[in-house]
Image: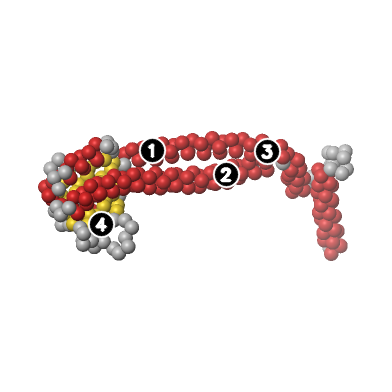
Amino acid sequence: MNITSKMTVYTVFVLAMVFSLLLMMNYFKFQNILSNVTSSRLAVVNQTLEDSISNAVNLGLALDEIQSAQSIIDRAKKSDKAIQSIDVFDANGQVLFSTRDGGNKSKIAAGVLDKLIKVKPANSVTNEWNNTTGEAFVVGVTLYNSFDRAIGGIVLNYDKSQYNGQVAAMLKELATATGLVLLGAAILAFIGIGFGFRELSRSYAAMEAALANVRDGKTSAAAESDTGSFDYKLQTIAGNVYEAYSLIDQSGASASKSTK
C-alpha cells in the first residue's frame, strides 16, 4: 500500500469516527426533544383535567363525590388514541375514577403513589410529576384542597409505541445521511489526496527503492537526467552510502591482512 492509500484510509477512518459521534449526538438530542415535547403535551391534558376537578373540590365536594369526573377523563382519553388510561385516585392510592375496565376497584401503583406530594411546597410553580417507564410515558398531577393538603392525584399513561417509531425512523434517516456524507467525503479524500500528494507519493516510492538498493548491496544509478530532481539526489545519496560501506569493508579486509 503506497503512502497516498494509507493517508486516504486514515482520513476516512477519522471522518467515520467524527460522523459517528455527530450521529449519536443528534440522535440523543432528537430523542430528548421529542420526549420533552410529548411530556409537555400530556402535561397540558393533565392540567386541563386538574382545573376541572379542582373547581369542583373548591365548591366543597369531596373527590369521590364529583360525578362529572368520569365523563371528563373519558373525553380526555378519546382525544388521543395513544392514551392508554387516565386514573383519578385519592391520597391513599385508591382509584376513584378510571378509564380502565374495573379500574375503579384497584389500587394505584406504589411507584406512582410515591410521587404524590403530600403537602404543597411553598412558592411551588408546578404540582406535576412523571414516572416514565420503558413502555409508556407516565405523567401525573397532585390535587390539593384549600389547605394545600394532597387529596389525591391524576395519572395518565401514554403508549410509547408512536414515540419509539419516530425515534427509530429518525435514527434510520440519520444513519443514511451520515453514510452518504461519509461516502462523498471518502471519494473526495481519495481524489484530493491522490492528486494533491502525487509528487510526495512518487518521492516516497523512490526513497523506498533507493533504500532497498542499499540494503541489497546494489549501486543505484541515476535514472533521471535532471540533476536537480529529488529522485536523482536521493539515488546519489544512496550510491554514496553504498560506496562508503564498500570502502569500510575494504579497509577492514586490508587491516585483517596486515595483522597476519
**Given contact means CB atoms under 8 Å apart, are the residues at marks 3 and 2 in contact?**
no
Tell me the tag on residue 192: 3
How crowded pointer 1 is (Cα within 10 Å; few <14, some 14-19, many 20+) is rated as some
CB contact under 8 Å: marks 2 and 1: no
Precedes in sequence: disc 3 or disc 2: 2
Q: Residue at coordinates 21% horizontally, 59% vertically from top-left?
A: 146
Secondary structure of the residue carrying tag 2 is helix
Q: CA distance from mark 3 to mark 4?
A: 60 Å
> Label 3 amino acid?
Gly
Residue at (23%, 47%) from the top-left corner?
52
Instruction: Residue 136 in the image: state x and y as whole percent.
Output: 29, 45
Q: Earlier in the sequence, mark 2 or mark 1?
A: 2
Q: Nearer the viewer, mark 1 or mark 3?
A: 1
Identify the disc placed on residue 115.
Answer: 4
Q: Residue at 25% across / 49% down in the picture?
A: 51
Amino acid type at mark 1: Gln
Q: How far apart are labels 4 and 1 at the CA level? A: 29 Å
**Label 2 sits on residue:** 15
Q: Looking at the image, is mark 2 or mark 1 nearer the viewer?
A: 1
Q: Secondary structure at mark 1?
A: helix
Q: Position of residue 180 (x, y in %)?
A: 54, 35
Tell me the number on the disc at residue 166: 1
Answer with the quarter of the image where residue 248 lies. bottom right
